[in-house]
Amino acid sequence: MTTKLAVNLPELQERARRQWDDLKHGDQPILWVGVGTCGLAAGAAKALTAAREELAAHGIEARIVPVGCIGACYLEPMLDIEEPGGPRVCYAEVTPEKARLIVQSHLVEGQPRPDLALGTVGEVEAPGIPRLFDLPMFAPQVRIVTRNLGLINPEEIGHYIADGGYGALQRALGMDPVAVIKEVEKSGLRGRGGGGFPTGRKWRSGREAHGEPKYVICNGDEGDPGAFMDRSVMEANPHAVIEGMMIGAYAIGSHQGFIYVRNEYPLAVVRLTKALEDARKHGLLGDNILGTEFSFDVRISRGGGAFVCGESTALMASLEGRPGEPRAKYVHTVEVGLHGQPTVLNNVETWANVPLIIARGGAWFASIGTEKSKGTKVFSLVGKVRNTGLVEVPMGMTLREIVFDIGGGIPDDKAFKAVQTGGPSGGCIPAQFLDTPVDFDRLTELGSMMGSGGLIVMDEDTCMVNVARYFLEFLQKESCGKCTVCREGVSQMLFLLNRICAGEGREGDVEVLLDLCELLENAALCGLGTTACNPVRSTINYFRGEYDEHIREKHCPAHECRGLFRYEIVAEKCRGCMACLKECPQGAISGERRKPHTIDQEKCVHCGLCFAACRFDSIAKV
Amino acid sequence: MEIEIARPDYDAATKVVIERYGRDPGFLIPMLQDLQNDFGYVPREAMEMVAEVLHIPLSQCYAVATFYTSISLVPRGRHLITLCLGTVCYLKGAREIGESIQRLLNVAFGGTTDDRLFTFQPVNCLGACALAPVMMIDDEYFDKVKLRQIPDILAKYSAQEKRGDY
């Protein structure tokens, strides 16, 4: 074992602060550009190229700082401009044209553009531009885990250290490991991956378990469709996750960690890999960390595209190079986990909370949230809601505040119908429970669950039977097939739901579904199977009328289930443009130019292409 | 993504991949994925070598390769169309988009077109829900996709091929 030079954290901090000051107080303007997956997908690279060209055209030299997603994904691509000593002004939905315009006005002419700006970030303000975090979508949030997102360069360890990063690690290394665990217990932190198991208790079991080596694992297999909190954190602040894992490893006595990242998150792998390399280079990972006896390192592994691998035992099987099949947990993984050794597994957000708990104290963390759910929760607020993106709120905030105050309500004047939480393991919560405070236990009482934190808003156009069908189809594809109840039960439920959505449902189908729910809940091997009942049971509980209408009247009230509603042309609105006629693969539409067309219902296969083709809203679903 | 279908020297590339992960059988999935990146799929020859070097049964490699959807044992098309079927994309019309792609290319979910130009791979969630519906062709993202854009998007790639842009 080679002993490295003892690394001195204050020295690193000093260097990092100087680096940060050089950036912030240098003589060049700074362009902060959001390059998370959502920013890149929305066109951040094109906007940046345009901005660079404009800068070059005017001979301006600027520092370009790539940052993660600040959370307002619907406003991507985002580009912030900061002149030396001036305000950092955030511009949203930056197209290449807009990028040129902003650079021209803000940097060449020295005039920030309040008409194009979203808000200012930081202490310096600009006249006529609100502070970003005072905006309605940010103001009610409490940003703890996401405090750095979009504000620091995730590929610069110095930015993280300048913000106090790795200070918690040093503090923990000066404490007795048991004292670290006590602090986490005091905080009341519960696992953010969905189950909500008390983290401190898990760590204590891990410490007390017999066997060497012990492992820590970060579960970054964020499989719930509609959830991307962990992706954002890994992409925008990877060092927080690593620091949390290091503190956990120290507390339980582990020297090896693994981060298991979904295959669909290539950028997260890149950022984490860079972060690990930098941490090693600075003596924060490896042997004798910060001059102590503590040695630890982390390896990254990628998932293979299997939802079930979010389940801890399946994930560990996957990390052993085997198919991701779960096992029964008579013996907990903290005692017999990866390679049969004691293993503490937490999800990304849980690990990212740890440094703050150690830095600010468990009591501080416990002062936020509700009686049994402490701290904040990061949600991905998506679906039929105006302000989609990442939100972090204290536990106990109501769904109404999240959906309507932060989310800005439902677009297009549609009515709110339900919010789906917890992914395929969760359920749909209807409007009458909008004032429910959100925490682990309340969501479970309502027949849903916290899950990893996806909040999917559904409006009047969403058919709740079809939502249940969608999730069961998902689960049927993802069921590993090891236990019969899940393999056959989920398939049978899907068969019934398919039948109902196709207009072939029979009286009694709903009762059979409920029986199957009970069976799965009691007899399936792992969490995927036991919670598969939630999407079905919650929609039956709260939207029984929709099931009955499908079965008895062969009609889908939300006009979503194909064949259970008709497309008709509204003669008054139809301009006879022939767009729908050309699209129709069945030749079911007839009519002459400039005269209203008609649909032959006998020939129509309800594919919806005419509906998509019409630019005059003249095709109605009835 | 450049894919070479017939590459005679499996050995050298496979060795590189195995060493990249320190011959640790725990990293079998990333190894197979890297091989897939190199060859466009996981050829039997490469898999046999992995099994031999890691001292694990070939059946374990096969079990892993067939369990995880990201790994393919048959050659894939030149372009990979990844369609997000996450909840939000689904609510916003991804199903219809998927059907349109199937119809236009005459390809099944997970299948490859006869001319080996496209492989169509729906995925559970790309995690970019704010931009739903989202699809990717190779590394290029298409956000807020509308059903009527699909023919043009696909045509662009087919036309590139005809012009010989590769």
Image: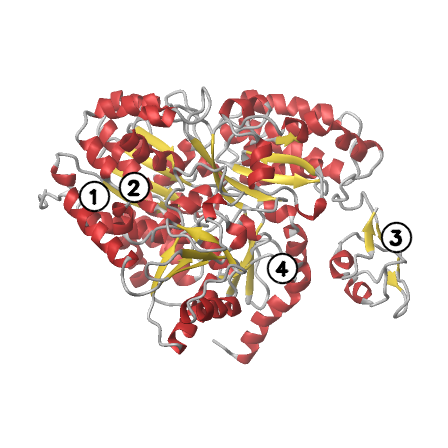
Q: Nearer the viewer, residue B41 or A56?
A: A56
Residue type (three-letter) at the residue carrying disc 4: Val
Q: Is residue A491 visible?
A: yes
Residue type (three-letter) at the residue carrying disc 3: Gln
Q: Are marks 1 and 3 in contact (CB under 8 Å)?
A: no
Residue tagged by mark 4?
Answer: B107
Q: Chain of mark 1?
A: A
Q: CA distance from mark 1 to mark 2?
A: 9 Å
Residue A357 sits in which quadrant?
Answer: top left
Q: Is residue A516 left or right of residue B17?
A: right
Q: Are marks 1 and 2 on the same chain?
A: yes
**SS state under label 4:** loop
Quadrant that contains the N terminus of chain A: top left
Q: CA distance from mark 4 to mark 3?
A: 28 Å
Residue tagged by mark 2?
Answer: A242
Give the number of the disc on residue A285.
1
